[in-house]
Image (cartoon, coloured by chain):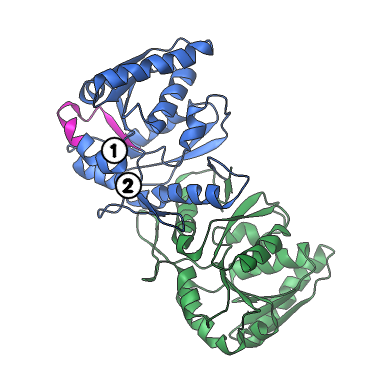
Chain colours: A green, B blue
Amino acid sequence: MRIALLGGTGDIGEGLALRFARDTDHEILIGSRDPEKARDAVESYEAELDDRGHEPTIKGFGNEMAADRADIVVLSVPPYYAGDTVEAIEDVLDEETILVTPAVGMNGDEDGMHYHPPGVGSVSELVAQRAPDGVPVVGAYHNLAAGKLADLDVEFDLDTLIVGDDSAANETIRTLTNEIDGLRALEAGPLANAAEVESVTPLVINIATYNDEMHDVGVKWI
Amino acid sequence: MRIALLGGTGDIGEGLALRFARDTDHEILIGSRDPEKARDAVESYEAELDDRGHEPTIKGFGNEMAADRADIVVLSVPPYYAGDTVEAIEDVLDEETILVTPAVGMNGDEDGMHYHPPGVGSVSELVAQRAPDGVPVVGAYHNLAAGKLADLDVEFDLDTLIVGDDSAANETIRTLTNEIDGLRALEAGPLANAAEVESVTPLVINIATYNDEMHDVGVKWI
């Protein structure tokens, strides 16, 4: 399959690109609003993978062109850009393309990070609302610490949760996710259950803040 | 120390009573609105522990009498009784008594369970608001599956998160919690961060619902 990581020059995009490229045979497309920035990122990801003896196929494009070529489009953009990014690529989305959203709305104060969803209930539901009819939307990769994700020296033993209303799309993303070494995808139900999944992201940041020995906190459901 | 489990005849109360009694030297007091019910529960908990070669000290009382005798009062009651239970025992609470709240507001629909906090933001903050001034309030034990907790054959390797505004009280509960075999307490900050902790409870129920092989789901932060 071809996997486009829009906003793929950011931290979650980088980690997903490196791990998908290292651990799977899928073709990775990096998307950015600035195609030049996407190609620079590709160069750096390929160099890092090459150093480790991998020869992945990664390509860089503008967001729309990356999405147009992909079977799976991951919106690894900040939450306040998620809706606009969907609209910017809507002409190239169809029922065969799975839209994956890892973004989480949060705000911070002196106590810590707090879950701050959009009015529709969650970023996942916002993306579904803004996506063209029939395009399957899956929430995933919310609670993966970007630092650990992008550091290929870190061996994972982590879970990520999947929410979505299209069970075939959920299954595709679950299978794909399980191809990353040490990452296990579990299902958490339809998009209506996304808020409880997304709100784990501010929580893992708070746990890292308030426990000296913990950094880049991830989660395992047992 | 003396630990009162109010609503200690319910499922979370039962599990905490059995594990505190088995794994620690603290004196366990079971509280119920009906003292007779509390004493019946004590009899059954003692029988179960006796079968396993333990001779714990557990006593049963009405809620107020249990709270009056205790250093730590755990409000293991349904969330909609938490505030009223605090008011029912307020005359016997003081700055030396730590009030611990594990309750979570949830509602369910055909999709799954959803976090449904009271208007003040979380049950933990509601309890703090209803408690007399100066009584330290700690949120803990929210995300422990009652079934696993009360089944002493299940060996734990689980985490529970602590929130609270009084760092000495947090530390007391953290230390106490770590005395339970296989249970690790981590801090998640002040009471203002309670919502993100409480909302993990509907999530673990959803994970159990949507993944065939998983039951009584718990969590490990890594």
Residue A99 part of the magenta segment: no
Name the residue that disc number 1 marks.
Answer: B137
Toward the viewer: B108 or A128? B108
- Secondary structure, mark 2, is helix
Q: Residue at x 40, y 33 (%)?
A: B12
Asked if residue A107 lies left or right of residue A20, the reply is left
Q: Is residue A23 above or below residue B123?
A: below
**Which residue appears at 49% of the width and 69% of the height?**
A124
- The answer to whether A15 is drawn above or below residue A217 in the figure is below
Which range is magenta? B86-101
Q: Residues within 10 Å of mark 1 (few under 14, many from 20)?
A: many
Looking at the picture, how far across and down is residue B3, in whole percent? Answer: 34, 23
- Name the residue type under label 2: Leu
Q: Is residue B94 magenta?
A: yes
Tell which of B141 and A204 is nearer to you.
Answer: B141
Q: Position of residue B173 (x, y in %)?
A: 39, 32
